[in-house]
Image (cartoon, grey):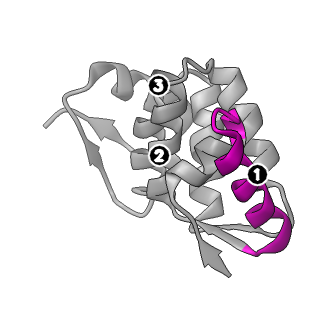
Amino acid sequence: MISIDTNIIVRLLTGDNQSQFKRAKALFSEENIFITTSVILECEWVLRYAYQFEQDEIIFAFQSLFGLSNVQLQDSQVIADAIGWHQDGMDFADAIHLAQSKESKLFVTFDKKLIKAASKATNLPVREP
């Protein structure tokens, strides 16, 4: 199994550099791939801001990629929860933070939008300090 960086996923999903796209595609064809949660978080940001991908495009790309039999995620449940909450309107980074905090008794933030979104998405209490 090999672990990959954000730029491998970005090259695969955008094809913006043909040489690197072919090499990234070969990795996914020939290797078992491990993807960390931090790489997924960074990848979403890069696709959204640098490549202007729409939310639905990112979700579709992630679900397709993460559904491959040779791809293993660091924490597939965290990513599944985060994608679902993101589809419901929560910021992707906030959704990851919240999903990784499910074992906590409380999630504290100054972000009122997150507090509102979290109240609809999870039973984890989220409030201001």
For residue 41, the mark is 2
User: Which is the main secondary structure of the residues drawn in magenta?
Assistant: helix
Does 55 sit above or below residue 59? above
Q: Is residue 27 magenta?
A: yes
Quarter holding the N terminus is bottom right
- For label 3, the residue is 50
Q: Secondary structure at mark 2?
A: helix
The span from disc 3 to disc 2 (Cα, nearest Å) is 14 Å
Q: Is residue 83 in sight in this rendering?
A: yes
Q: Is residue 123 in sight in this rendering?
A: no
Magenta stretch in the rendered image: 13-32
Nearer mark to the viewer, of 3 and 1:
1
Does 36 sit above or below residue 42? below
Q: Position of residue 126 (x, y in %)?
A: 33, 38
Nearer mark to the viewer, of 3 and 2:
3
Label 3 or label 1, whichever comes before in sequence order: 1
**Nearest the eye: 62 or 6:** 6
The span from disc 1 to disc 2 (Cα, nearest Å) is 23 Å
Is there a contact, CB below 8 Å, between mark 3 and mark 2? Answer: no
Q: Secondary structure at mark 1?
A: helix
- For label 1, the residue is 22
Identity of the amino acid at label 1? Lys
Q: Position of residue 9 (x, y in %)?
A: 62, 49
Identity of the amino acid at label 2? Leu
Q: Secondary structure at mark 3?
A: loop
